[in-house]
Image: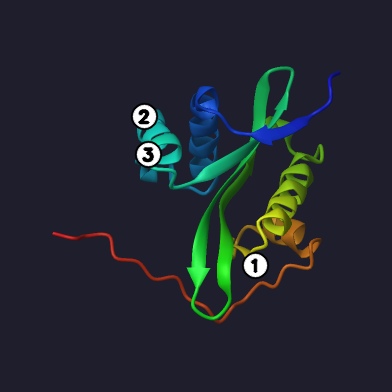
Amino acid sequence: MNEIVIRNGSESDLKAVHDLIIELAIYEKAPNEVETTVESMREDAFSSKLFSFIVAEQNNEIMGLALYYYRYSTWKGKCLFLEDLVVSEEHRRKGIGSLLMDEMIAISKKEKVSRLMWQVLDWNQPAIDFYKKYDAIIEPEWLNCKIIDFS
């Protein structure tokens, strides 16, 4: 069995990455909420440079991903936001999530950001337990807000 490799994502990874996003949406009971396509992700990642991603790969199979982008805090400065960390269900409990999270921490240090941030659903106890291993601060007082209709 070959070693699991964590590397920067490429355009040729986008189909597998999108498949993982669909798998995550199904897990989160929202399969019809995914509006991105491989093409829109290609544009946003590689032309517009709106996000970056790393993948976990073994034997040419993408088994997990971490998708992130920069944000700016008026109080703390440059930050990284981890939009999603996903490991395919069939490859969970093999340490892949830890490899991806460790790489996100390394990227955060290299980029000299003030913090690495993300969200976790309150019912996703396996994810909460995973993040607690990293001494993550899980803040119950912040509420998510969004506007989805700009018509």
Disc 3 versus disc 1: nearer the observer: 1
Q: Which residue is mark 3?
A: 36
Any part of residue 119 in sight: no
**Label 1: which secondary element:** strand
- Label count reads 3
Q: Which residue is mark 1?
A: 115
Q: Position of residue 146 (x, y in %)?
A: 35, 66
Measure the alpha-carbon separation of dots 3 and 1. 27 Å
Measure the alpha-carbon separation of dots 3 and 2. 8 Å
The quarter of the displayed image where residue 110 is located: bottom right
> Viewer-proximal residue, 54 or 97?
54
Q: Residue at x 73, y 44 (%)?
A: 97
Q: Give the amino acid at mark 2.
A: Glu
Q: Which residue is mark 2?
A: 39
Task: Bin the neighbour count of mark 2 within 10 Å (Cα to Cα): few under 14, some 14-19, many 20 and up.
Answer: few
Asked whether the beta carbons under mark 2 and mark 1 sit within 8 Å of each other, the answer is: no
Task: Bin the neighbour count of mark 1 within 10 Å (Cα to Cα): few under 14, some 14-19, many 20 and up.
Answer: some
Q: Give the amino acid at mark 3.
A: Thr
**Label 3: which secondary element:** loop
Q: Position of residue 133 (x, y in %)?
A: 81, 61
* Quadrant of the image containing the N terminus: top right
Q: Which comes sooner in the sequence, label 2 or label 1?
A: 2
Q: Which comes sooner in the sequence, label 3 or label 1?
A: 3
Q: Which mark is residue 10?
A: none
Disc 3 versus disc 2: nearer the observer: 2
